[in-house]
Amino acid sequence: MPEGHTLHRLAAAYRQVFGGGSVRVSSPQGPFADAAALLDGRPLTTTEAHGKHLFLGFGDPANNPAAAPDWVHIHLGLYGKVRFGEGPAPAPVGQIRLRLSTGDDTGAAAHADLRGPATCALISDPEKQEVHRRLGPDPLRADSAPDLAWQRMSRSGTTVAALLMDQKVLSGVGNIYRAEVLFRQGIDPRLPGRALTREQWDAVWTDLTLLMADGVRDGWIDTVRPEHTPEAMGRPAREDAHGGEVYVYRRAGLPCLVCTTPVSAGTHAGRNLFWCPTCQPTAALDRP
C-alpha cells in the first residue's frame, strides 16, 4: 500500500495538471458513472491529502466561489494506481474507475486514470470533515497536531511499531517509514507506547516530517544519512523496486550500515518488522 508521501504527490499532480479549469470527468468502468456525470465540466478547485487518503475538490456548478466544493474521496488500498498522460485520452482498457481529462476526447491535452482503488466516492464537505476526524495527525500537513498522537501513544500498552501504523493515531506512515524512523532514533519497535519518552516522540515526529517531505520531493523513500550513502561507504547501491537507500527495511540478515550487526526481521500485527538489535537495544523494553 502506498505510504503518505505518495498521496501528497498525487494531490500536487492533480492540482498542477487540472487545477482551475473545467475538467471532463468520466468512469469508463461504470461504478462511479453517476457521480462522474454530476462533476463533468466543473472546475477542479482544490486537492489535498491526509495520510493515505486523497481528496479532489470540485467547484460549484454555478461557479459560486463561496460554495463548499464537492469532494471525490480516494483511498488507493493495496491495488489502486493513478496514471497521468499527455495528449488525447486513449480508449479505456481494463477497469478505470475515474478518468479526468482536459478538452474533449479527441483533443485532450492531458488525462489521468484511476484504477483499482479501495475507495472512490463522491462526498460532501461535512462527510470529508468526518474522515479527517477519524484520522491521526499527518506529518506532512501544516494543520497537524503531534500532541494528539503523543497522548494516544503515551497511554497505550500497544507497541510503538503497531501504534505508528495505526492510522487513527498517526496518518500516512507505512511499513518503510515505520522501520526506518525507529532505527534512526534507536528505538526498539517492540517498546510499549507508554514507555516512550516525550523526547523520543518529539524526535520521531520531527524526523518523520523531514523524511516524508523528502519523499514528496523525490518520489521515493530514502532514509540514510550522508555518511551512510553508497558513495560515502564505497558499497553497492540498493536494488529494490521501492527505490531509495534504507537502513533496515527489507535488509534482514544483511549487516547494519552503522554497526554491522545482522538486521533482524519478524512479523508483528500481521506486518513484516525490521530492526537492528544493537542500534535499537531491547534494554529499553524494561523502562517503566
Image (tube, helix red, strand yellow):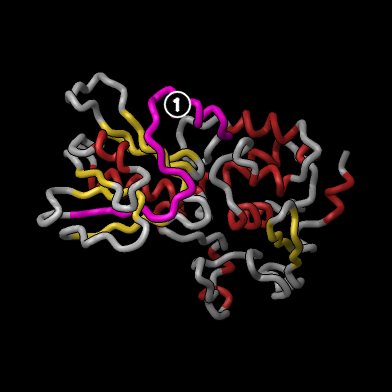
Q: Residue at left 52%, top 55%?
A: 78
Q: Is residue 13 magenta?
A: no
Q: Secondary structure at mark 1?
A: helix
Residue found at the far top of this picture? 66
* Residue on which disc 1 sits: 127
| Viewer-closest of 180 and 67 | 67
Relative horizontal placement of residue 5, taking residue 145 as reference (left or right)? left
Q: Is residue 48 left or right of residue 208?
A: left
Amino acid type for the residue under numbered disc 1: Glu
Please state which of residues 181 and 110 is positioned toward the viewer in this rendering.
110
Q: Going by the image, does 121 lie left or right of 168?
A: left
Neighbours of disc 1 within 10 Å: few (<14), some (14-19), many (20+)? some
Q: How many marks on residues?
A: 1
Closer to us: 240 or 117 = 117
Please tell me which residue is depicted at 23% across the width and 41% down the height of the picture. Answer: 19
Q: Quadrant of the C terminus?
A: top right
Task: Name which residue lies at 76% across and 40% down.
Answer: 193
Q: In the image, which residues are magenta?
A: 110-136
Indicate the position of residue 75 as horizontal and vertical percent values: 47, 45
Figure quadrant of residue 49: top left
Residue 196's spot in the image, x, y percent? 76, 40
**Magenta stretch: includes residue 130:** yes
Dividing the picture into quadrants, the one containing residue 175 is bottom right
| x then y, percent, for residue 160 | 73, 45
- 40 in relation to 81, above or below: above
Instruction: Pinpoint residue 192: horizontal percent, then vertical percent.
Output: 80, 43
Q: Taking 46 as reference, is 85 above or below it?
A: below
